[in-house]
Image (cartoon, rainbow, N blue to C red):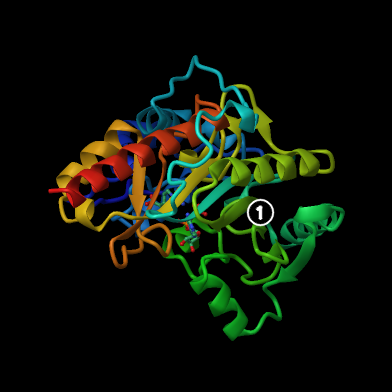
Amino acid sequence: MHYPTFPKACTSLLCKYFTPEVFEALKEKRTGFDFTVAQAINSGVENPDSGIGVYAGDEESYEVFDLLFDPIIQEYHGFSKNQSHQSNLNPDELSTVNPDPEGEYIVSTRIRVGRNLKDFPLGPAIDKQSRLIAEKMISGALSSLEGELKGEYYPLLGMSKEVQQDLIEDHFLFKEGDRFLEAAGLNGNWPEGRGIYHNNDKTFLVWVNEEDQLRIISMQEGGDIKEIFTRLTSAIKQLEKQLNFSYNKHLGYITSCPTNLGTAMRASVHIKVPRLAANMEKFKTITDRYHLQIRGIHGEHSKSEGGVYDISNRRRLGITEVDAVQDMIDGVTALIAAEKALENT
Ligand code: ADP
Ligand code: ILO
């Protein structure tokens, strides 16, 4: 392996922290699942416009390649090597049920967590057979869910292109052919082993074997965040009875992308703020103050449409799930107040 060349304009955390010295120290190392630093950095090397640019192949990657991962984790989450992670899934500890009770600004709310199975490699290092075993274990656990969470598992293999496209456009299903995931080695043997589980109303969904082995999702129209968080936490607790998720005291839930470590939670709203969006500087001042991320409405790396943005918590590690959702609630409350003020000027 040679030291990669990065374009001058590259701003990813990979470009920032993968120095020639780090490369020398890591180039010969391998994890128990045979994952190398060349694999960890490939997404950011092939996609120099990445924000981060690295993926882990297994839990051990975070230790073996710590010289690369630690500073990235520190910068993204503000979390250092001697800290530990705490979980809190109690919806009663949220300060606000709904920051937009009149339903004027929030179009929809979605909260997801990533999970991976203990003792399995993560997506960038898994082989076809283990991926199929993981799919079987996960769909088996899902088939035992009852009540509001009861649904059906739909494998991607055999799903018609029309059904797949409708699910993507309606914000329920992951996209196909993501270039960042492709270069990370996450799209191997596509579409085998991948699928989506959902209840009848599509308010509870689970993505299987996309970027993480499970993405557990609760979503609905409007801004009743407490109801959505309550549904999610109840599902997590039920699934934990049957599946052993990869977790450690330092990094929390283990995920393939270091931005998802910890809570692995992204709590987002699709929110209509056309006036604020016309003043991006002001918009970003508020989102930065509340540790929020702005995405377009078709997911990461997509654009906004009609003044509607996807606003979510940015930090996920070293804070609890309640804190992560609270970041989003507080920020969204501030955004709505700013949009209202602009309406009156
Ligand atoms: P993630 O990292 O959370 O899995 P993406 O940014 O790739 O996410 O988004 C996945 C899908 O979820 C996309 O179709 C996106 O439009 C949809 N989505 C995200 N937040 C919301 C929301 N609040 N309401 C409706 N759909 C949403
Ligand atoms: N690898 C991409 C995405 C990073 C964060 N998003 C996730 C976890 N999907 C990049 O570095 O821009």
| Residue at the spot 28% in from the left edge and 61% down from the top edge | 307
- At a point 65% along the width and 29% down the height, the residue shown is 90
345 sits left or right of 261 in the view: left
Q: Check the image and name the residue furthest to the top.
A: 82
| 19 versus 52 height, above or below | above
Position in image of residue 136 (x %, y %) = 81, 59
Judging depth in this view, the residue of 177 and 35 nearest the camera is 177
Q: Is residue 209 above or below residue 69?
A: below
Q: Give coordinates of residue 77: x percent, y percent.
A: 41, 30
Instruction: Residue 73: tell me if it is visible.
Output: yes
- Amino acid type, mark 1: Ile
Does the residue tagged 1 have its C-beta within 8 Å of any atom of ligand 2?
Answer: no
Q: Residue furthest left?
A: 345
Q: Is residue 239 left or right of residue 276?
A: right
Which residue appears at 66% of the width and 51% of the height? 214
Q: Give the labeled residue for mark 1.
A: 126
Tell me if residue 226 comes above or below residue 317 in the rendering. Answer: below
Q: Can you tell which quarter of the image residue 133 is in? A: bottom right
| Identity of the residue drawn at 26% across and 37% down | 286
Neighbour tally class for label 1: few under 14, some 14-19, many 20 plus, Cα within 10 Å: many
Frontmost residue, 279 versus 240: 279
- The correct choice, above or below, for 244 with respect to 344 in the image is above
User: Helix, strand, or loop for circle 1?
Assistant: loop
